[in-house]
């Protein structure tokens, strides 16, 4: 009896294990997938946080750069205001120069007249002996009062001559002083114009640099925000997988629990049936033994009992466990790459390799605007600054030059043996501040603040010390 019970228990256990183990293994697989997906969610969240920090940093940097850009723009505007004021001063200086030149001309006429008068008086003294005439004029007086009167007349004449000589000396000194004042005023105005040209070139350079930085930051910010969106999509996908695997894990655990309950019920039923059959066999055996004792006949092997026992044994059956299928794994969408667009590079005209532009090609265009006034930032016949003039003339023959004097110097082919048609460059301080067109014989034509478009000497007292060199296009 104990052996049969043990057999039933073993068969029940094997049946239970064959059903539970695949289901439990399936549940463990889902748990691993859930853990892996949760790790992916955490990693993606870290990537999102890092992308957000990058976006915030780029936005802060962009804000700072835009502030610097606004400051540079304000400085440029302030320089333009200063230039307007300076041009007014230059115009006033030009008028003052014209007034001084007029005064100088008037003084020179007076000096010439007095010189002629003094020469006449000196000639009279030499010819007629005016000094003796003065004495005779006094001696011939008829009375004392007449003597005093004649002395006063002679005194007035001598004093008048003396005042005439003194006025002549004073006027000559005034002429010299006014000439020096005029020249000094022009030099100062030229120096201020050069400083403004230098400041303009530097500010425009800084403005371009800041604009490039702002564009690059905008590109990087857009790229970082794209990365953030990509990470958010990956996180949503990972969270979806977590929910899917968690649901599958719960379903697998429910299947394990249901299988366990079903197997338990079947095992209990089998044990009850086997226990009932075993009781019947025992009772029959006892009755058989009692019959033998009463008849004293050796009993044979109880065939019927054996058959019943085998029948009870064969009645025990095991069910084949039902396998649950693992749901298909959801594929993670392929990552997309975002290419950062390249920042367009500024182009500069290539220097000529054919010997440069000749003065004969440029001359008619340059001389056609002779006398055009100087205008800060000017590029038309209403007014030119130095680089505006050279750009205008070269554009007439199909050559595009950079806008500033410093830019024209940087992109030109430097030459040590200048020919007419080359550009000549000057500086007052750290960088190029003035440019003109070399015409030969030590002369160049350019738009100067003091004269407008005019010829001047490369080696003059003002431009000579500032000469840098020559460039060819």
Image (cartoon, helix red, strand yellow):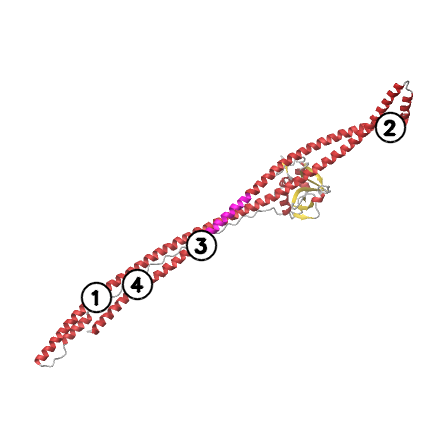
Q: CA distance from mark 2 to mark 3?
A: 107 Å
- Circle on res. 47: 3
Q: Secondary structure at mark 3?
A: helix
Q: Is residue 380 visible?
A: no
Task: Tell me if mark 4 has few (under 14), some (14-19) or many (20+) residues whose alpha carbon lies within 10 angstroms of its own.
Answer: many
Measure how far apart labels 2 and 4 are at the Cα level.
143 Å
Q: CA distance from mark 1 to mark 4?
A: 22 Å
Q: Residue at x 72, y 35 (%)?
A: 181
Q: Which mark is residue 23?
A: 4
Residue occupied by mark 2:
122
**Disc nearest the viewer among 1 and 4:** 1
Looking at the image, residue 381 sits to the left or right of residue 55; the answer is right
Question: Which mark is first along the chain, 3 or 2?
Answer: 3
Discs 2, 3 touching: Cβ within 8 Å:
no
- Give coordinates of residue 381: x percent, y percent: 63, 35
At label 2, counting other C-alpha atoms closer than 10 Å, the crowd grade (few under 14, some 14-19, many 20 or more) is: some
Task: Give SS at disc 4.
Answer: helix
SS for callout 1: helix
Say which mark, if any, is on residue 58.
none
- For label 1, the residue is 268
Give the side of residue 107 with respect to residue 357, left or right.
Answer: right
- Disc on the earlier residue, 2 or 4: 4
Query: Neighbour class for label 1 at 10 Å: few (<14), some, many (≥20)?
Result: few
Q: Which residues are magenta?
A: 51-69
Location of residue 84 (image quadrant): top right
Is residue 390 shown left or right of residue 266?
right
Residue at 51% of width from left, 47% of height from top? Answer: 62
Q: How far apart are the alpha carbons under marks 3 and 1?
A: 56 Å
């Amino acid at each position: 009896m104990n052996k049969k019970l043990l057999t039933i228990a073993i068969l029940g256990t094997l049946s239970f294990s064959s059903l539970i183990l695949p289901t439990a293994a399936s549940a463990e697989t889902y748990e691993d997938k859930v853990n892996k997906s949760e790790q992916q969610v955490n990693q993606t969240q870290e990537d999102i946080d890092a992308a957000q920090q990058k976006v915030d940093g780029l936005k802060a940097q962009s804000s700072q750069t835009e502030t610097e850009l606004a400051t540079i723009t304000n400085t440029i505007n302030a320089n333009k205001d200063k230039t307007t004021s300076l041009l007014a001063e230059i115009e006033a200086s030009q008028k003052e120069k014209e007034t001084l030149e007029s005064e100088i001309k008037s003084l020179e006429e007076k000096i010439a007249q007095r010189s002629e008068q003094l020469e006449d008086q000196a000639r009279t003294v030499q010819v007629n002996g005016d000094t003796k005439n003065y004495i005779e004029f006094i001696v011939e007086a008829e009375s004392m009062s007449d003597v005093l009167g004649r002395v006063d007349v002679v005194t007035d004449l001598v004093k008048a001559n003396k005042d005439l000589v003194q006025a002549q000396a004073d006027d000559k000194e005034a002429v010299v002083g006014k000439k020096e004042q005029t020249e000094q005023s022009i030099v100062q105005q030229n120096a201020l114009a050069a400083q403004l040209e230098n400041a303009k070139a530097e500010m425009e350079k800084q403005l371009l640099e800041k604009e490039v930085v702002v564009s690059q930051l905008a590109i990087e910010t857009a790229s970082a925000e794209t990365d953030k969106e990509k990470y958010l999509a990956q996180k949503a996908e990972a969270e979806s997988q977590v929910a899917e695997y968690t649901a599958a894990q719960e379903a697998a655990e429910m299947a394990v629990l249901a299988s366990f309950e079903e197997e338990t019920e079947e095992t209990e039923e089998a044990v009850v049936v086997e226990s009932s059959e075993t009781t019947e066999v025992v009772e029959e055996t006892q009755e058989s033994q009692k019959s033998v004792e009463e008849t004293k006949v050796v009993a044979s092997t109880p065939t019927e009992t054996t058959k019943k026992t085998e029948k009870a044994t064969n009645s025990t059956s095991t069910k084949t466990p039902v396998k649950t299928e693992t749901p298909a794994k959801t594929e993670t969408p392929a990552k997309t790459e975002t290419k950062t667009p390249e920042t367009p590079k500024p182009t500069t005209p290539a220097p000529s390799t054919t010997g440069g532009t000749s003065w004969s090609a440029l001359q008619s265009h340059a001389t056609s605007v002779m006398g055009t006034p100087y205008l800060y930032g000017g590029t038309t016949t209403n007014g030119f600054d130095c680089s505006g003039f050279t750009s205008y003339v070269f554009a007439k023959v199909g050559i595009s030059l950079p806008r500033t004097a410093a830019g024209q110097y940087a992109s030109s082919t430097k030459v040590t043996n200048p020919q007419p048609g080359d550009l000549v460059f000057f500086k007052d301080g750290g960088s190029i501040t003035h440019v003109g067109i070399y015409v030969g014989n030590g002369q160049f034509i350019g738009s100067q603040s003091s004269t407008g478009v005019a010829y001047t000497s490369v080696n003059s007292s003002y431009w000579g010390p500032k000469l840098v060199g020559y460039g060819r296009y």
